[in-house]
Amino acid sequence: MSERSEAGGVRTAPAIELIGATKRFRTPSGALHTAVRDLDLTVAQGEFVAVVGPTGCGKSTTLTLVSGLEEPTEGDVRVYGEPVRGIGAEVGFVFQQDAVFPWRTVLSNVMAGPRFRGVPAAEARERARDWLGRVGLAAFEDRYPHQLSGGMRKRVALAQTFVNDPTILLMDEPFSALDVQTRALMSDQLLELWAGTSSSRNAASVVFVTHDLDEAIALADRVVVMTAGPATVKEIFTVDLPRPRTVEAVRLEPRFVELYREIWASLGEEVRITRERGAGRAA
Ligand SMILES: Nc1ncnc2c1ncn2[C@@H]1O[C@H](COP(=O)(O)OP(=O)(O)OP(=O)(O)O)[C@@H](O)[C@H]1O
């Protein structure tokens, strides 16, 4: 049996397990659409896994199964060895869209999560300020989201997520709306924040969905290639590049280029299948 951190024990189960997970949705016409099919994936505690796959194949649906927002139609989804039931307190999300409250200041946005979880205001404020410092926004705590750049808003979103001390981070194309340079800086910042959790008992495990194979290799310990929809795991590649990494430097390593070529051979085939099926066709 897995032990929970509240008991102070060491958890032995993997952070995430999807075992034969299948998800079918009923479409507006009443037909059943399979988004995820018989998917097996295990994410170890403290591991950073990137998920790549053709557009519409079922990557986001896979994340929603882990988050507890959706239940699998068949199969099991477990977090620390326990079946997922509803949204777990240990799970943090970062999506493509900003999840900031526009009417609240930066500080108030970052405090919102801990306050919602019952942390007293003074402590929540202290924790929020600590995280705003770590993401380089200490001087901006009184600003409103519309007064920030896209990259700064993303940093607020990261602070908002990490302040809740999640041990599972689900990230769905979190940086895709950013320009290339800001994106690289954000990726480095994410790697730093994630590495900062590794010395603690609650090392964070990350599942990072992206369309960008460069980003996937630069960030992850393993890259999971999904099939054309319905999504299932096609192949998993171990990224044997040393850490700490910075995304701009790691891209120049010969091993990076080799990995890119190997993974693209697998991913490109699925992208072609999806294209041949034609945009918008339901599988
Ligand atoms: N709630 C839902 N009801 C019906 N169909 C859904 C629902 N959610 C997702 N789908 C369908 O499931 C399939 C997979 O969608 P999903 O968003 O998981 O793909 P994705 O790989 O994340 O896509 P993208 O790469 O474009 O972001 C799509 O065909 C989508 O239309």
Image (tube, helix red, strand yellow):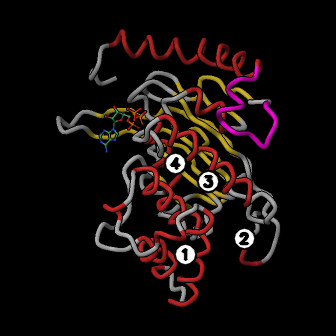
Q: Amino acid at mark 1?
A: Ala
| Cα–Cα span, label 2 and label 4 | 23 Å
Q: Amino acid at mark 2?
A: Arg
Which is in the foreground here, disc 4 or disc 1? 1
Give the extent of the magenta segment. Answer: 241-253
Q: Nearer the viewer, residue 272 or 142?
A: 142
How many residues crowd around disc 4 within 10 Å: few (fewer than 14), some, or many (20 or more)? many
Q: Label for residue 271?
A: none
Could you tell me residue 282's position as x and y percent? 29, 24
Q: For the point 44% across and 34% down, which residue is it?
A: 58
Residue that numbered label 3 is attached to: 78
Identify whether 125 is placed above or below 20. below
Q: Earlier in the sequence, mark 3 or mark 2?
A: 2
Q: Amino acid at mark 3?
A: Arg
Disc 3 on helix, strand or loop? strand
Identify whether 199 is placed above or below 28. below
Q: Nearer the viewer, residue 30 or 98?
A: 98
- Magenta stretch containing residue 206, yes or no? no
Query: Which residue in the rendered view is the most extreme toward the left?
Result: 29
How many residues crowd around disc 1 within 10 Å: few (fewer than 14), some, or many (20 or more)? many
Q: Nearer the viewer, residue 252 or 22?
A: 252
| Cα–Cα span, label 4 and label 1 | 21 Å
Residue that numbered label 2 is attached to: 4
Q: Earlier in the sequence, mark 1 or mark 3?
A: 3
Residue that numbered label 4 is attached to: 171
Identify whether 258 is placed above or below 21. above
